[in-house]
Amino acid sequence: MAGTSDSSERNRMLPDDEPGAWTPLVSGWLGWIFFAGVLLIMVGVLQVIEGLVALFDEGYYVVGADQLAVPADYTVWGWVHIMVGVLAALIGVGLLTGNMVARGAAVGLASFSALTSLAFVAAAPAWSVIVIGIDVLVIFAIVVHGGELDRSSRHG
């Protein structure tokens, strides 16, 4: 019958204000949250790589550890980057699975990751700017479009 929808289609729709009218449950903006999850996993991988380089090849960086915003040994910086990277990847996976707690954790961790990269910018300028840019995109996607994930999980 034209004009009627089967039960599987109704499960993906929300009732509108008018009787008999249905609106889509998932908007196109929900893709931003999944995009943020993938970017957060990518930030995690980049942070782990940066940490491993700091641990195993201190001569790679442009300046000495004493010339960084936070003058700490590169071994310390390496472990900080590795911990941030592992957490970022785990939280990114949480975003991809629709975990609501991961949304708040992602904003906090992306902010911390950006600050860490900002403090490390003298040692690896291009790398740090790339990571900061990705972190800003993650924060934007979650803060602006995070409500879409909440809406789809309440009605899904």
Image (tube, rainbow, N blue to C red):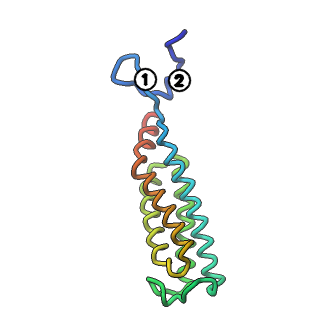
Residue 131, label in figure? none
Q: Is residue 60 left or right of residue 153?
A: right
Check disc 1 and report its element: helix, strand or loop.
strand
Q: Are dots 2 and 1 in contact, CB under 8 Å?
A: no
Would you call the spot at circle 1 few (<14 residues within 10 Å), some (14-19), or many (20 or more)?
some
Residue 9, label in figure? 2
Quadrant of the image containing the N terminus: top right
Front residue of 8/20: it is 20
Residue holding disc 1: 22
Q: 45 above or below 31?
A: below
Please give the name of the residue rendered at 43% of the width and 42% of the height, measured from the top-left corner.
148
Looking at the image, the residue that sits furthest to the top is: 1
Please give the name of the residue rendered at 50% of the width and 78% of the height, measured from the top-left corner.
120
Instruction: Tell me which amino acid carries mark 1.
Output: Trp
Q: 155 above or below 127?
A: above
Please give the name of the residue rendered at 54% of the width and 56% of the height, measured from the top-left corner.
92
CA separation in Å, label 2 and label 1: 10 Å
